[in-house]
Image (tube, helix red, strand yellow):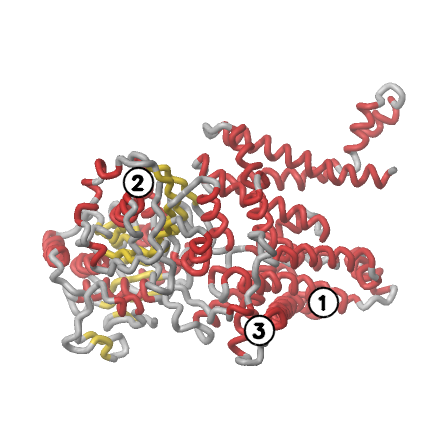
Amino acid sequence: MSTLRDSAEALALPLLALAGGLALFGAFVWFDGHDPLQAWALLFRGAFGDAFSLQNTLQRAAPLMLTALAVALPARVGLTVIGGEGALVLGGLACAALPVLLPGLIPGGTAGATLLLLAAGVAGAAWIALAGALRQFRGVNETISSLLLGYIAIALFKHIVEGPLRDPASLNKPSTLPLPESLRIGTIGAYDVHWGLVFGVVACLLAAFWLSATTHGLATRVVGGNLRAARLVGLPADRLVITACALGGAAAGLAGGIEVAAVHQSANASLIVGLGYTGILVSFVARHHPLAIIPVAILFGGFLAAGSLLQRRMGLPDASVQVLMGFCFVFILASEAWRGRLGTLFAVRRAPVTLPAGGAAGAA
Amino acid sequence: MNRPLHPTRRHLLAAGAAFALPGALPGSLGGAFAQAPITVGMLYVGPRDDFGYNQAHAEAAAQLKKMPGIKLVEEENVPETQAVQKSMQGMISQDGATLLFPTSFGYFDPHMLAIAGKNPKVRFSHCGGMWTKGKHPDNTGSFFGYIDEAQYLNGVIAGHMSKSKKLGFVAAKPIPQVLRNINAFTMGARSVDPKITTNVIFTGDWSMPVKEAEATNGLADQGVDVFTCHVDGPKVVMETAAKRGKMVCGYHASQAKLAPQAYLTGAEWNWLTAYTQILEAARTGKPHPNFVRGGLKEGFVKSSPYGAMVSEGARKNAEDVRKKMMAGAFDIFGGELKDNTGKVVVPKGKVFKQTDVELEGMNYLVEGVIGKA
């Protein structure tokens, strides 16, 4: 019974918060001289209204699922890592560079594409594992080091893409050599969504399974819960921390690899658009839970897709969507204060006469 | 309605042929367009009010919107990722757009090409790309302006006004379009006084406000007294230089409002000319103009009005050069031209016309520029 109530609450809280954010956004556009009803209708249409909108939303959500994991997994061992952007660009670079560095050694088709994505994951994993190792062995704060490592990664990326690996034919937009046709990642069947979405969803599911259903995952959560207790019971804390960081980094690196193989076809500055930073927000809103990341990333994708329609139909500036996202996520984070109290409030309303004392105590 | 493009169309509008439409200038457009309504989509990579690249497009788009029968849909801050593909497709399937202007360089390949392949009846006109016959679909194309002509005129004015004989150029990346502007600006200034040098700082990206301010301050400390730039939003460079009591030449759009005391003149885009040319072809069912280029003469670029402080001699010199450019009797890049390492890059006797595509692959900085490409 209590678990049922808990999960009902887990669903009701963010939905109520979302409604609050949307209501406030309505007031905001109304204040600005626009019709809030039209804005709400367009938001829904642009995000989920038809097949095109839905695919648009899912496509935008795909990379965010992976970059959110780069924050969520280290968070489960108690680390606040915000350097997913660096892992993403290095992943993209590794994916684009492999065929150039190993000419003739990469097979075409799925096998070759798998190798490229593997390289992308390894590059990302190494970068975030470095932040984890610095923290465990040198006592360097991982939030700061991962952020700074992100800047270094971007600088390295630009140096290599615009220097040694630059395709001489890419004049005004310095890029690496484009990937051969056979190594690119296509769309899922007839849908206009590439396979990155499947990678994102599967990675989130695997991460959830690992954390909740394996011994290793349990040990990881123990380290995150209480590092000293974990050490006292003999858990290899350093190894677990670095593994969690590496897995998170691998997810972000994979996101970069997919962006290159499915979208850009080569590594260039268009890869650096803040997907890694948006992942931080997604992970925090999902409370670092891999399963919650999927719907939150889709919500984010929906906002971005809807924002596109909002601009075109109502002439609102791009910043209005950021205002909406700001409202919604502040509400969602603030709604945490109601956790555990929402049910009591409803109970009070339903049975005020039979449980007056309990109701008063619950509301207080 | 938009007539589908003829698939076996052989003729291509060569660079020069695109200019053979003198009647397509804004003044004479009103009557020509009283036809079926058309929905036009504009995509910008940054904010529409950036006092720079995106604003120059947005201002021209606002002019376009005023014409009868035009429905304009716009989107700003569209990144060069899957997002721009979705936005373009959305404009087509949700808004019924049949002519799209994706204005950022990075939209061309692979994004515009991907969406153009899926929508063969929609016309795409990209700003800045190198459309190539046979390589790219016929329903796509590119337009661009020879703004280095206006940068040359900036240089002439800067050359007259500078007292320290040191000019500053804050640039994003050492790519051909940028190098061409730096070179033209420097050559304009050195046509006034060959002792003049231009210090270049590359910030590494198109929108780096902090680095742009640091670069401007750094150059000011080195004695530079006239600045110009090639970044997406020149606002920071203009304001920082003006605050330091230095003079500026604008870029992309007019920044005169930001620094009225310091603003000498500026190199501005006049995209309306290109837009209307492409739009007219779409509305009358003529073949899509695939490769559209033009400079001062064709009305693709213009100069900002001179600031009050610009001397009579400077104005006269610049206007003389402008007259020659308008008459097609002035070539910026002619031999013998040396780069700043002393190597001859254009041999004696060789003269490049603005339309020569070799210039779109420029990879050197000319003599007098202090910096490395």
Pick the residue in front: B112 or B273: B112
Callout 2: SS? helix
Residue type indicated by callout 2: Leu
The reply to the same-chain question for discs 1 and 3 is yes
Q: Residue furthest top?
A: A353
Residue B8 placement: quadrant: bottom left
Residue A108 circle label: 3
SS class of the residue under badge 3? loop
Circle 1 SS class: helix
Residue A242's label in the rendered image is 1
Q: Nearer the viewer, residue A68 or A221?
A: A68
* Chain designation of label 2: B
Q: Is B159 placed above or below A304 here?
A: below
Instruction: Report the side of B127 relative to A96 (left or right).
Output: left
- Cα separation, mark 2 vs mark 1, equals 57 Å
Q: CA distance from mark 1 to mark 3?
A: 33 Å
Can residue B332 be seen by looking at this rendering?
A: yes
Which of the image's four quarters has the C terminus of chain A?
Answer: top right
Q: Quadrant of residue A184?
A: bottom right
Q: Is residue B154 above or below residue A343?
A: below
Give the farthest residue toward the front: B8
In the image shown, does B193 or A316 lie closer to the viewer? A316
Q: Are marks 2 and 3 in contact (CB under 8 Å)?
A: no
- Evaluate if marks 2 and 1 touch, with contact meaning CB atoms under 8 Å apart: no
Q: Dot 2, how many residues are within 10 Å of its Cα: few (below 14), some (14-19), or many (20+)?
A: some
